[in-house]
Image (cartoon, helix red, strand yellow):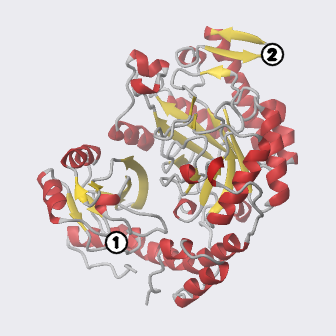
Amino acid sequence: MSAPIISLESLTNTTSSGQLLTTAKSGDCASSSCGSSSRPTDMDSATWEKVKDHPCFSEEAHHYFARMHVAVAPACNIQCNYCNRKYDCANESRPGVVSEKLTPDQALRKVIAVANEVPQLSVLGIAGPGDACYDWNKTRATFERVAREIPDIKLCISTNGLALPEHVDELVEMNISHVTITINMVDPEVGEKIYPWIFYGHRRYTGLDAAKILHERQMLGLEMLSERGILTKINSVMIPGVNDEHLIEVNKWVRERGAFLHNVMPLISDPAHGTSFGLTGQRGPDALELKTLQDSLEGGAKLMRHCRQCRADAVGLLGTDRGQEFTLDQIPLEPSYDGARRHAYREVVARIHDDHLAAKEKALAAVTSVNIRGSLQVAVATKGGGRINEHFGHAKEFQIYEASQTGIKFVGHRKIEPYCHGGWGEDAALLGIIAALEGIDFVLCARIGECPKEKLMEAGIRATDAYGYDYIEAAISALHATEYGTAPSQATA
């Protein structure tokens, strides 16, 4: 028998650690191993300890845990044709964009304020808006301050890799266990099309010389991190006609040098953003092109498919940015850290995590037992917690799953404009949603009205709220059984 449903909202909207624990305990726990932290069978225990609550390094963790970025590193040592760092841009959601730059002291103040209000917080990252390794003094000062106040928070940085080798030993000393390097090429002739210039060794390089130096420094930095046991995620921007086919070679190189994850992201090239690629008409890939490339990389370096291409001041669960709630004018001048809610939340997650895993394993077994070549592409509206718990009209994105004889796997997400505004559906928004859901067979959500359901059906997409609040994999297993005429799964919770 499955455990009663405990919603993520009920856990995070409570005002005290005591209420958090009461909510969790009231749901009891169906798993015989309640409270354990079960790890994947293909991962050693040391690595699992590093990633089990890091939402960027674990697809499982991103259902439960949050990250925040502090914008303390505005200086950058390279120019990318896809980048334009902007400030005070609350409505743009992409890397390099922030609403305010912070000093290390202001960053500490903000981290404490967020940690007190967002119990899911587990990771602090510095991702610019420039380069965290090039603007190193500010990066280091921020991490030192935060580590003293909140010693259990994970620290990680994102970097282009040019200045990385100079700071690897310091990263080890500071117990920084996760690093992301953006690597878009291993062939300088490809890199020349992406990077107009770099600044290295007190001088500026352009063209092929710039790309050669950047490539050498990136590979050196990756190798140094791997030798020291720091987990490394590689970000690569997919640029059609420039490096899309070349990213297969990038995947091989980074795997050979010990990368833990490879995250292939779509180019964002809206002309309104003012980037070189945007202004010259370089297009980004569509969702199916991105998935096709990602699928071709299976078997190489392990893929990350749940990235949201976060702002440099993002706060919250992936896909739910709460950064605008924590600007400096909205937080206390001298907040005092209280870790009770964060610690209580972790106990809550431990109580429900095994129940989710049990339902997931049962669902996977049911799907893999069916001898059918076809697959289902399923879009899920969720607020987190691994459940179908978002209304269709309120969704800002759909998480995409594929069910086939090999199992049920997360394969990406698709951002959309919400359908409902002020209680009314917008026809234009629905047309955009239908376009974004190209190739999708089913939409699963907590609630959906008859009008959008009918419009989706006309486009060949079936939508249902029959599995509302079930675990995602369990619902997909039941749907798969119904679709292919097999015995219905009993894994729904």
Marks 1 and 2: CB-CB under 8 Å? Answer: no
Residue type marked 1: Ala
Residue 393 vertical position relative to residue 269 in the rendered view, above or below: below
Decide which of tag 1 and tag 2 comes sooner along the chain: 2
Q: Secondary structure at mark 1?
A: helix
Q: Is residue 30 left or right of residue 461?
A: right
Residue 219: image quadrant is top right
Residue 254 vertical position relative to residue 212 in the rendered view, above or below: below
Residue at 53%, 48% in the rendered image: 304
Residue type marked 2: Gly
Residue 463 vertical position relative to residue 184 in the rendered view, above or below: below
Picture coordinates of residue 492 (x, y %)?
37, 79
Residue at 64%, 81% in the rendered image: 35
Q: Is residue 444 left or right of residue 169?
A: left
Which one is in front, 348 or 274?
Answer: 274
Residue at 46%, 40% in the rendered image: 91
Residue 185: image quadrant is top right
Residue 274 vertical position relative to residue 203 in the rendered view, above or below: below
Residue denoted by label 2: 201
Badge count = 2
Residue at 33%, 47% in the rendered image: 417
Q: Is residue 173 left or right of residue 129?
A: right
Q: Quadrant of the N terminus?
A: bottom left
Residue 35 disc label: none
Picture coordinates of residue 249 (x, y %)?
54, 30
Residue denoted by label 1: 475
Q: Secondary structure at mark 2?
A: loop
Q: Quadrant of the C terminus?
A: bottom left
